[in-house]
Image (cartoon, rainbow, N blue to C red):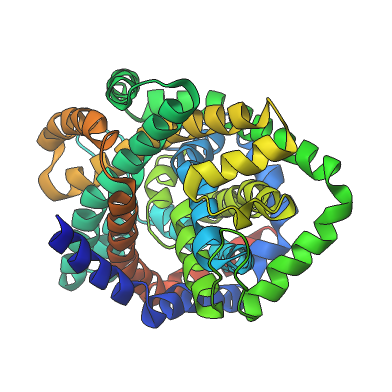
């Protein structure tokens, strides 16, 4: 096991090295410039479209634009917002939070592009349901000679889901429930498996219905808790923001249980954990947006880009600022334990349970959302007959994930994320003229 850990660690160091960071940030910057920073400029319009998209129209698709966003958010708002942010700060110092923000603002353009392509190039399966995502916009947009790239993405996504969307979530839940309530890890894993199985057996409509009901409620509850912490520490917030910004460009000194971090560590872990959390560039979210009831790829793109804003700029910031403003990052704790320490320090007797419940619910919805991504990737590779076996395997893996080594799982998931991102980012770059053309045509028609 130690040899495998070493090998994957070496691969991880390579795939999340300078080339990957340049590819992710460079793609986001290229799209932002090409779109004239449309995603950032149209954030208010994005929120308006989210509210408007609650109603299901008569356009083609299976779920409302709002529920498509909630399904993608159910997969992105998970342990990355709680344990992932804390791990980034533990490994890269407070400056990691700054690079998460940068990656998110650029990632909004990437997420917009993904959804535009997903809706534009989507297909219908044997049952008449709309399917899309990187594997489909590579195949239909780039042609048969690029099918190997589509297969590569689908293969990596179907495997990566068992890391980012399954075992990591199960492990984080079982770990926090054991530390908070003394519940054995296996018991948590079994209960999670049963609950997830009950939802995913109903397919995208049941998943979307659950996401539309649970995600807004839990996100708002977590947000309110964070705002209370900020209100109680209002005088410390300017200093915390200053620490985050300064640490992004200067090495962070060791203090307390914190070993210190370099600028490179802040950049590397900030971007990597940011992508892990909001998934901009991974190619996962467009699989959900392809099922939206819409006749406008651009409109759905604007809805989709808000997922990155909500996930990182709002929710991850709550966790990150709480950790910095309370000074919890100097404790030597990492992962969910660090987030829990920050919240319990600021909100005695309550904060610990806010993090615990938030992590459990977020992780559960992530497991449900990612099951759909994996399912559609397997469908692309093997057809409709592979869906039921995939769902069964997805559920059976959960109890095992709840008892696995957390460090190894995080390392494996990070590595697989990179392998997903590479073919997707290549496809987005090659299809960028289509994105710019569709966007220009839409806004010319709308006279905006």
Q: Quadrant of the C terminus?
A: bottom right
Reply above or below: 259 against 50.
below
User: Which of these two is toward me, 36 or 370?
Assistant: 370
- Kindly tell me whether residue 293 is visible in this rendering: no
Where residue 177 sits, quadrant-wise, is top left
Where residue 12 sits, quadrant-wise, is bottom left
Question: In percent of the image, x 53 and y 67: which residue is there?
Answer: 259
User: Which of these two is toward me, 41 or 259?
Assistant: 259
- Kindly tell me whether residue 99 is visible in this rendering: yes
Question: In percent of the image, x 87 and y 48: which residue is there?
Answer: 234
Where residue 343 sits, quadrant-wise, is top right
| Image label count | 0
Tell me where residue 72 appears, x and y as whole percent. 46, 42
Reply above or below: 206 against 76.
above
In the rendered view, does 159 fall on the left or right side of 237? left
User: Which of these two is toward me, 100 or 82?
Assistant: 82
In the rendered view, does 367 fall on the left or right side of 140? right
Reply above or below: 369 against 299.
above
In the rendered view, does 174 fall on the left or right side of 103? left
In the rendered view, does 344 fall on the left or right side of 426? right
Q: Quadrant of the N terminus?
A: bottom left
Tell me where residue 36 appears, x and y as whole percent. 65, 75
């Amino acid at each position: 096991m130690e040899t495998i850990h070493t090998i994957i660690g070496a691969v991880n160091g390579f795939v999340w090295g300078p080339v990957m960071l340049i590819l992710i940030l460079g793609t986001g910057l290229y799209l932002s410039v090409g779109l004239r920073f449309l995603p950032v400029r149209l954030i208010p319009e994005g929120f308006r479209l989210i509210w408007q998209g609650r109603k299901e129209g008569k356009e083609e698709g299976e779920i409302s634009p709002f529920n498509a966003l909630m399904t993608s958010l159910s997969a992105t708002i998970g342990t990355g917002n709680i344990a992932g942010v804390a791990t980034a700060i533990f490994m890269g110092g407070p400056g990691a939070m700054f690079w998460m923000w940068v990656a998110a603002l650029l990632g909004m353009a990437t997420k917009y592009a993904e959804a535009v392509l997903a809706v534009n190039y989507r297909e219908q399966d044997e049952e008449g349901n709309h399917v899309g995502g990187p594997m489909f916009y590579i195949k239909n947009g780039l042609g048969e000679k690029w099918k190997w790239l589509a297969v590569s993405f689908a293969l990596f996504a179907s495997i990566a889901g068992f890391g980012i969307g399954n075992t990591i979530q199960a492990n984080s839940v079982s770990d926090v429930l054991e530390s908070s309530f003394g519940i054995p890890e296996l018991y948590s894993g079994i209960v999670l498996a049963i609950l997830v199985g009950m939802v995913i057996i109903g397919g995208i409509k049941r998943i979307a219905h659950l996401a539309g009901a649970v995600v807004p409620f839990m996100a708002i509850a977590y947000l309110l808790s964070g705002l209370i912490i900020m209100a109680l520490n209002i005088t410390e917030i300017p200093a915390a923001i200053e620490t985050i910004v300064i640490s992004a460009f200067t090495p962070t000194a060791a203090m307390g249980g914190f070993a210190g971090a370099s600028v490179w560590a802040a950049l590397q872990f900030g971007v990597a954990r940011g992508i892990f959390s909001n998934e901009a560039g991974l190619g996962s979210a467009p699989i959900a947006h392809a099922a939206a009831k819409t006749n406008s790829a651009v409109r759905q793109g604007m809805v989709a880009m808000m997922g990155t804003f909500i996930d990182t700029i709002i929710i991850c910031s709550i966790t990150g600022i709480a950790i910095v403003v309370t000074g919890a990052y100097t404790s030597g704790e990492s992962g969910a334990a660090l987030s829990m320490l920050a919240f319990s320090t600021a909100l005695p007797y309550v904060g610990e349970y806010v993090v615990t419940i938030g992590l459990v619910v977020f992780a559960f919805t992530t497991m449900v959302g990612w099951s759909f991504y994996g399912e559609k990737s397997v469908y692309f590779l093997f057809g409709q007959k592979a869906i039921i076996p995939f769902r069964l395997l997805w559920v059976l893996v959960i109890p095992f994930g709840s008892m696995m080594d957390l460090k190894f799982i995080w390392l494996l998931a990070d590595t697989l994320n990179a392998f997903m991102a590479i073919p997707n980012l290549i496809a987005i770059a090659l299809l960028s003229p289509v994105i710019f053309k569709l966007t220009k045509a839409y806004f010319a028609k709308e006279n905006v």
